[in-house]
Image: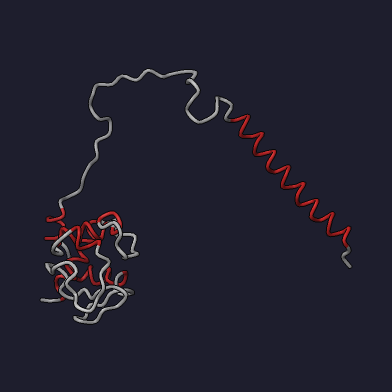
Amino acid sequence: MFDTMTMTKIIGGFCGALLIFLMGGWAAETIYHSGGGGHGEAEQAYVIPVEDDGAAAEVVEEGPEFAELYAMASAADGEKLWRNCRSCHSNEAGKNGTGPYLHGVVDRAVGAVDGYNYSGALVAVAETWTPENLDAFLENPKGYAPGTAMGYSGMRSAEDRAALIAYLASLDG
């Protein structure tokens, strides 16, 4: 069915198509980036003058403080958010999962769960899991403790973090 000549034609066709593709990319790069060897080396043709009054143009509006959110947080709402955590953590004392158990985690020393091998990154950033430390960690675990083994990407809503921490605080009474 296939002989040597047919296979040679097929391979030659693929090589020719690849060559055309690469030459097209080179030509496009030459046409659209012809201002020199790299980006930003060419002088801008027209500069728009902008008045600067020295003040920052954009004012970032911050929400309420975490302490206020935590004081108003509902443990019942936090229990609903627990579903994100329970795939790796347990809320029963002494029962570790992929992560350490979270029963009594609020105001517990960091890295204090017996039988769980911590990565070491957490112990370097905090001594105890205060509500504020938990808030910062839950917002961005990799940013708060670089090198942590926790694979969770973070909880963006400050209200949700406060509710989850209130739920975790309610577990141990």
- Give percent across and percent down for residue 152: 33, 63
Camera-side residue of 79 and 136? 136
At horizontal 52% and vertical 30% (from top left) the residue drawn is: 38
Q: Residue 13's spot in the image, x, y percent?
A: 80, 51
| Residue 88, position as x, y percentages in the image | 32, 73
Residue 58 pos. (x, y %): 27, 34
Task: State which quadrant residue 155 falls in.
Answer: bottom left
In the figure, 17 relative to 148: above or below? above
The C terminus, quarter of image: bottom left
- Colouring scheme applied when the structure was drawn: secondary structure
The answer to which image quadrant residue 67 occupies is bottom left
Q: Is residue 104 left or right of residue 138?
A: left
Q: Going 84% across and 54% down the picture, which residue do you hit?
A: 9
Name above or below for residue 173 compared with residue 34: below
Q: Residue at x 63, y 29 (%)?
A: 31
Left or right, 78 with respect to 151, comes to left
Q: Quadrant of the N terminus?
A: bottom right
Observer-nearest of 74 and 157: 157
Number of numbered discs present? 0
Q: Is residue 123 left or right of residue 13?
A: left
Query: Is 88 on the left-hand or right-hand side of 94?
Result: right
Compared to residue 6, the image places residue 93 above or below, namely: below
The residue located at (20%, 59%) in the rendering is 124
